[in-house]
Image (cartoon, rainbow, N blue to C red):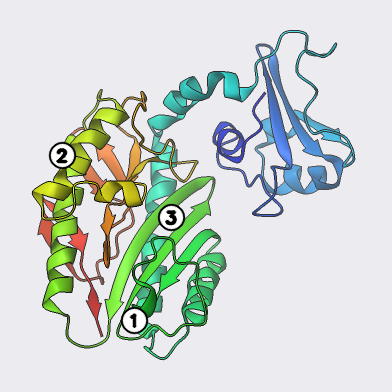
Amino acid sequence: MLRSHGAVSWYLDGVRTHVSLSGDPVVGVVVRRDGDEVRVFANEAERFAAEELLPSDAAAIVPVPWHEPLLPALGGPSLPRVLDETDLAAELRAARASLLPGETARYRALGRTAAEVLTDVAAAADPAQAEREVAAAIAGGLAARGIDPLVVLVAGASRLGVRHPLPTAAPLGRRAMLVACGRRAGLIANLTRWVRFGAAEPDEQDASSRILHVEAGFLVATRPGRRLDAVLADGVAGYARHGFAADEWRRHHQGGAAGYVGRDPRAVPGAADRVQVGQAFAWNPSAPGAKVEDTMLLGASGFDVLTSDPRWPSLEIGGLARPIELER
């Protein structure tokens, strides 16, 4: 039984599984050897069949009354031998890791559009604007393009030490960080951008440059067949090598594989998932006042940045154009 947003959307080729972004899926799938049951709450079934599913999948819809459990109980009389997706979590992640051509095309379009939204918002931002105003512009820009704004973070100059800066009424000030995680057709793009108003401080420029080189270490370490925990170990070793505290990585997660979940999975010590060709990654090393994040696709010859907008200023590191601060 598939019951999570990521697993169901992947299995049904990018369908929208939500009504509330903070709620449980309104659709689940019982995958049988002789065919599937696409179980949808009855008040959503007609819309789902018309707008979300292929005709072959729509034929498999089983309407479920809204007041009943979406999926039958494990081990009940109708399903005496059944596995929940949590029983096969690692195997399912491995199955969806290497993206198919259609998925890759959708991801490229999503990444490009999400990057364009952040460029547009940063180019129009004003230092007197409240973080919430900028966040609203990001969320509105994403939604207008069919992208669900799953995470929108904005830190003005007074809050740059906050690693997950939920937007407040504080003004942007002379420097700001913008973060977005947007989902369309099931896939999630993650990216971070910086904008400043006026000249940069030398120490800020230095930290921003060094964090890009930490990221480069993560990218070099992300090679097909390697375990994620080994990639993480190599990547975090770059903090001390580039002048940060050796334990800086403990103050914020470092990212990991990407796709139908924001991090699929997040890289942590002990993560046994192996890197695959055709898999997406979003590493995000950070330090006080410095962070870099893009969603990239790993090909046979290296990484391709999906969340890229050529209008954004960049410099080349390791053969990739990496974003630097937009000076206004």
Q: CA distance from mark 2 to mark 3?
A: 25 Å
What kind of residue is marked 3? Answer: Leu
Residue 123, position in %: x, y? 34, 81
On screen, residue 265 above or below 311? above
* Nearer to the camera, 324 or 291: 291
Q: CA distance from mark 1 to mark 3?
A: 20 Å
Verify CB contact (< 8 Å) between mark 2 and mark 1: no
What kind of residue is marked 2? Answer: Val
Confirm whether residue 183 shows in the render: yes
N-terminal of the pair, mark 2 or mark 3, is: 3
Query: Would you name the residue on which mark 3 appears?
Result: 110
Verify CB contact (< 8 Å) between mark 2 and mark 3: no
Residue 262, position in %: x, y? 46, 46
Residue 84, position in %: x, y? 65, 21
Q: Which mark is residue 264?
A: none
Using the rendered view, name the quadrant where residue 209 is placed: bottom left
Query: Would you name the residue on which mark 1 appears?
Result: 123
N-terminal of the pair, mark 2 or mark 1, is: 1
Instruction: Please name which of the two marks, 1 or 3, marks the residue nearer to the observer.
Output: 1
On screen, residue 128 above or below 263? below
Query: Would you name the residue on which mark 2 appears?
Result: 220
Q: Residue at x 65, y 11 (%)?
A: 33
Confirm whether residue 318 shows in the render: no
Residue at the outermost top position:
81
Quadrant the N terminus occupies: top right
- Number of residues whose C-alpha sits closer than 10 Å to that of mark 2, classed few (under 14), some (14–19) or many (20 or more): some
Q: Residue at x 67, y 40 (%)?
A: 53
Is 145 left, or right, of 171 in this rendering?
right
Disc 3 secondary structure class: helix
Verify CB contact (< 8 Å) between mark 1 and mark 3: no
Q: CA distance from mark 2 to mark 1?
A: 32 Å
Residue 92, position in %: x, y? 50, 24
